[in-house]
Image (cartoon, rainbow, N blue to C red):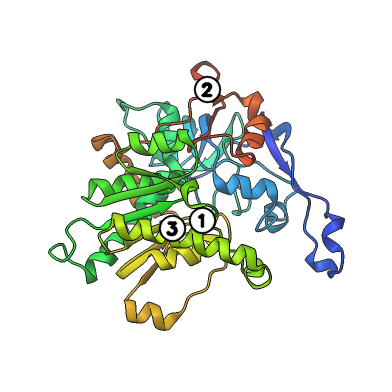
């Protein structure tokens, strides 16, 4: 059987330090290092496609997989090793029987659904928690045709741009097409012709605010580095330096035990909310895109106005949040939660992007396949802008 070069996430041994004063069932595997190895490449079966990945984009779910948080995906999948990578561009090499979405020789975008419900909404993510799926961190892989969206033959955009687009921008598309109509149900255009849409987060938030601006919204995005602030401005979105307001991450334990922290947090929160009030002429934020979760939930809630929408498609810094239902009911605040998109929405997003230029700008450095471990370290040390990409094959090796 043919083989391919790959970076593999190995199953982990239990971190014994995590078992102190805790039952054995609470133990978690230690963070992982990707291991270079080879994988077997089967012939594509019915509905399957053999592809050569060209460029991949390192995604948040890949970071979660390496840190084994919130789950150990090797254990969840019952596998000794997993090849990550559910965002990228590929060259189609060979199609199995009954393939209708792509043809040999075409370039395609990876659409990251591993499993879905009967309406096409995703449940498991391809090359993450969907068992048996092999991602773009391999020089060859076999994918279901349902994970490939053909790219226009004459596309104006690079492989790296489409790689950065494939997960983050389609996630933003799916989320915006629930959040914005929800806002408009309560606040038609004659009530709020240019809603205030704010966000913190990464590439998904940037993509969604770009969409919001294209819908006539007044978009503001918070970030903490000069490079990110510049990229936000280049996208036509108002940048706001998050460091001006100190640490806005709320720690409930410190709040209850540390008066000094409590006072400092109050001052930071008050300064930020005063900024929101001034910039929105008293309306406060009408759609807040929050892909962070947990520690920013409190200040996000306070920044929302009436008939507003809090929307998310992720939980980078915490899955659990609280809500005061009476306040939300009286304020008519809506909470939107989405997870990626349906295949037809992905097709629509690709067509819209090609037509309008709604596209990402990948980070300047394109990591080589050999440099993937360095990319992982840079990601966890926050040494990137929004879209860190890596090359798997060039056109010669892809052939």
- Say which element carries label 3: helix
Quadrant housing residue 119: bottom left
Residue mark closest to the camera, 3 vs 1: 3
- Decide which of tag 2 and tag 3 comes sooner along the chain: 3
Which residue appears at 32% of the width and 42% of the height?
237
Residue annotated with mark 1: 292
Which residue appears at 49% of the width and 31% of the height?
94
Kindly indicate whether the residue at mark 1 contacts the one at mark 2 (C-beta within 8 angstroms): no
Quadrant housing residue 84: top right
Residue mark closest to the camera, 2 vs 3: 3
Q: Is residue 40 visible?
A: no
Residue annotated with mark 2: 398
Q: CA distance from mark 2 to mark 3?
A: 53 Å
Q: Nearer the viewer, residue 317 or 241?
A: 241
Please give left or right for residue 82 compared with residue 111 in the image: right
Q: Number of marks in the image?
A: 3
- Decide which of tag 3 and tag 1 comes sooner along the chain: 3
Q: CA distance from mark 3 to mark 1?
A: 20 Å
- Say which element carries label 1: loop
Q: Residues within 10 Å of mark 3 (few under 14, many from 20)?
A: some
Kindly indicate whether the residue at mark 1 contacts the one at mark 3 (C-beta within 8 angstroms): no
Q: Nearer the viewer, residue 255 or 267?
A: 267
Q: What label sits on residue 271 in the rendered view?
A: 3
Q: CA distance from mark 2 to mark 1?
A: 37 Å
Q: Position of residue 315 (x, y in %)?
A: 53, 58
Q: Position of residue 71 (x, y in %)?
A: 67, 58
Please give left or right for residue 30 compared with residue 206 in the image: right
Q: Nearer the viewer, residue 219 or 8?
A: 219
Q: Position of residue 267 (x, y in %)?
A: 50, 61
């Amino acid at each position: 059987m043919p083989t391919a070069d790959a970076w593999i996430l190995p199953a982990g041994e239990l971190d014994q330090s995590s078992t102190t004063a805790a039952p054995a069932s609470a133990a978690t595997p230690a963070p992982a290092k990707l291991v270079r190895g080879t994988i077997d490449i089967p012939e594509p079966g019915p509905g399957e496609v053999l592809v050569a990945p060209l460029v991949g984009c390192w995604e948040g779910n890949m970071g979660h997989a390496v840190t084994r948080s919130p789950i150990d995906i090797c254990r969840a999948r019952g596998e000794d090793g997993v090849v990550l990578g559910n965002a990228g561009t590929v060259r189609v090499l060979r199609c199995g029987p009954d393939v209708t979405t792509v043809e040999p020789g075409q370039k395609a975008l990876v659409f990251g659904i591993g499993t879905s419900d009967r309406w096409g909404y995703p449940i498991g993510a391809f090359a993450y928690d969907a068992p048996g799926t092999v991602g773009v961190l391999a020089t060859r892989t076999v994918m279901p045709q349902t994970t490939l969206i053909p790219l226009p033959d004459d596309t104006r955009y690079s492989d790296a741009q489409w790689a950065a687009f494939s997960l983050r921008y389609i996630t933003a598309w799916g989320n915006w097409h629930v959040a914005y109509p929800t806002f408009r149900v309560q606040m038609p255009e004659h009530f709020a012709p240019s809603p205030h849409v704010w966000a913190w987060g990464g590439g998904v938030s940037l993509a969604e605010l770009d969409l919001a601006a294209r819908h006539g919204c007044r978009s503001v995005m918070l970030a903490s580095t000069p490079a990110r602030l510049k990229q936000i401005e280049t996208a036509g979105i108002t940048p706001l330096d998050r460091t001006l307001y100190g640490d806005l991450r709320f720690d409930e334990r410190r709040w209850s035990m540390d008066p000094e922290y409590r006072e400092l947090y109050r001052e930071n929160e008050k300064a930020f909310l005063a900024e929101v009030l001034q910039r929105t002429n008293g309306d406060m934020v009408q759609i807040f895109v929050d892909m962070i979760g947990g520690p920013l939930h409190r200040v996000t809630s306070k920044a929302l106005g009436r008939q507003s929408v809090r929307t998310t498609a992720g939980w980078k810094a915490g899955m659990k949040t609280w809500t005061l239902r009476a306040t939300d009911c009286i304020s008519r605040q809506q909470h939107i939660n989405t997870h990626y998109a349906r295949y037809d929405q992905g097709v629509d997003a690709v067509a819209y992007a090609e037509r309008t230029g709604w596209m990402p700008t990948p980070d300047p450095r394109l990591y080589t396949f050999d440099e993937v471990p360095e990319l992982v370290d840079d990601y966890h040390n926050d040494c990137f802008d929004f879209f860190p990409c890596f090359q798997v094959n060039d056109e010669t090796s892809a052939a």
